[in-house]
Amino acid sequence: MKLLSFENSLLNRFDYFCKKSLKFSNYKILKTEKRMQDKIVLYSKLSEDIFYQLYTLDDYNILKFVINIRDFEIAIENEMLYKALMLLSEKKREIILLSFFMDMTDEEIGKYMLIPRSSVQYNRKSALKYIKNLMKRGK
């Protein structure tokens, strides 16, 4: 079936209209994206100085107790735990803090403190037992 000239003309106009609409829509999308790219700042592209000016670290002034062990500084927020730790001998306190706060294994603690692993294990168990008894009594 052959199209008549006015039908062909109509079809061409519709085709032109569709192409122009798509081109305009595409242009509008590209223009909007360009505008957004001009406004958006990626954190990965910022210099370190500017990046560190854009954030803050909240500190709620919670009462903290600090215990220093050789190379480490450990902050404890629980007053009862702090008091219990301070009642331990220095050796047992170090073992407990290195084990639970620094996530060191008995072997690593033994190498760090220059004592056998079995001694670390014994001191940790006896310190925990002592702390447990203190907590039961409510001191």
Image (cartoon, rainbow, N blue to C red):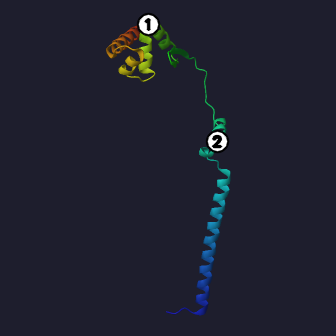
Q: Which mark is residue 47?
A: 2
Is residue 36 rendered to the left or right of residue 68? right
Q: Which residue is rendered at x = 65% and y = 50% of the image?
A: 40
Q: Gap in Å between the C-alphas at discs 2 and 1? A: 48 Å
Q: Nearer the viewer, residue 107 or 52?
A: 107
User: Does 47 sit above or below residue 75?
Assistant: below
Image quadrant in which you'd find residue 28: bottom right
Is residue 18 rendered to the left or right of residue 85? right
Q: Which mark is residue 22?
A: none
Q: Which residue is rendered at x = 60% and y = 71% of the image?
A: 22
Q: Amino acid at mark 1?
A: Ser
Residue 98, percent from left and from top: 43, 19
Q: Nearer the viewer, residue 35 or 48?
A: 48
Asked if residue 37 can be seen in this view, the reply is yes
Local SS, label 1: loop
User: Does 12 sit above or below residue 85?
Assistant: below
Q: Nearer the viewer, residue 84 or 89?
A: 89
Asked if residue 139 can be seen in this view, the reply is no
Label 1 neighbour load within 10 Å: few <14, some 14-19, many 20+: few
Residue 99, percent from left and from top: 41, 19
Residue behind mark 1: 89
Give whichever of discs 2 and 1 has the lower sequence position.
2
Q: How many marks?
A: 2
Image quadrant in which you'd find residue 97: top left
Image quadrant in which you'd find residue 102: top left
Local SS, label 2: loop
Q: Amino acid at mark 2?
A: Ser
Q: Nearer the viewer, residue 49 or 14?
A: 49
Residue 16, percent from left and from top: 62, 79
Q: Which residue is rendered at x = 52% and y = 15% of the image?
A: 68
